Amino acid sequence: MEPGRSRTVAAVLLSTLVAPLGVPLVSPALPAIRDAFGLTAATASLLVSAYFLPGVVLAPVVGTVADRVGPRRVLVGSLVGFGVTGGAIAAAPTFAAALAIRVVQGVAATGVFVTAVVILGARFEGASRRVALGWNVAALSAGAAVYPLVGGALAAVSWNAPFLAYLVALPVALVAHVAIDSTHRPAVAPSRLRAALGAVATLDRWPLYLSAFLSDAFLLGVVLTTVPFLLAGEYGLSSVGVGAIVTAGMGAAFVVSLAGGRLGSHVSNRALIAAGHGCYAVGMAGVWLAGSPVGVAAAVVVHGAGVGLSLPAVDAAISDRSTAGARAGALGLRVSASFAGRTLGPVAFAAVGDPSALLGGVAIAGIGLLAVARGA
């Protein structure tokens, strides 16, 4: 079956579109949250770290559980948990309570991220798999481009208004329950769960996990951290101008993700991933060398294209190399690597506090390219 004709694919993509609500929706509200609870900016930003940290540890476990009980059950339950906990933060009496609920929401978000790629990876083969996984990255990119605008508008009403938007996950959970095929045979016996977890981290896949880590570390560290500070500080752009350039980068990821599946019919996953890392290097060098906001925007677009080329191909390559019984665990480890990149990327680039950090990023992207070219 073609991905475009599948109710399951439509429901999964709708679920994926909800997933980026996690950070892009909340980021514009951080100053209001800081003021409402009398916090420092660093303390308020813990709402971002608390969201990603559970996934770093739990994603492979969630994937293995999905192999055992069925990915639809995990996805539906995760969407319900995601919506309920997100809405509950709006009523949190203290920041400590909000932070605790946010950690639980991060666990639920991990289930959404993992099972989305598991369902698509298991349902299709070859070029169709690349198309479906490309659409999945496109949905993530579209949400990341639009939700900051929504979050900013809601934050203008009150600090907690953005969190009420998470309740949209509840009707999406109902759609997923109805539309996704429930047929599932346990692929991993309970006694073999530990062995399955160990099997997903084989040496032939480590360049793929490295690629996933670097892709998200660069995206959040460069596009969503370094570039906004550079545009505001060096070029005096307003928040609207900064948002427009960041959105352009995510738009490029969206467009290339949609086309990447078709391109994968003629180009290997390894070549697509390597091309993506080449785009990261060119994009970061371009940001460093640009002498104007237009130059920065062009470099960010190149970087976004790299995301669209690399991430769907990483998921497709991991799916291709995994047996049915280990696929969810393997893809769960990919999500774990991505979450680690999202957690550490902003910290690493912000710690340097200088655009010269981009040159280090170029070198690291080159190392990633070599690793992928030799081993992926």
Image (cartoon, grey):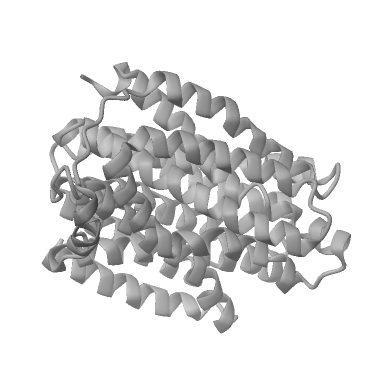
Residue 324 or residue 140, whichever sits in front: 324
Residue 194: name its quadrant. Answer: bottom left
Residue 63 or residue 165, whichever sits in front: 63
Q: Residue 361 location in percent, x, y?
A: 41, 74
The residue drawn where x is 37% and y is 73% is 362
Residue 252 or residue 216, whichever sits in front: 216
Up-down relation of residue 226 to residue 5 (above or below): below
**In which quadrant will I find the N terminus?**
top left
Residue 347: name its quadrant. Answer: bottom right
**In which quadrant will I find the C terminus?**
bottom left
Q: Is residue 194 left or right of residue 155?
A: left
Q: Residue 42 location in percent, x, y?
A: 71, 73
Up-down relation of residue 93 to residue 25 (above or below): below
The residue positioned farthest toward the front in the image shown: 191
Q: Is residue 259 left or right of residue 302?
A: left
Q: Is residue 58 visible?
A: yes
The residue drawn where x is 59% and y is 49% is 22
Residue 176: name its quadrant. Answer: top left
Q: Residue 12 location in percent, x, y?
A: 40, 31
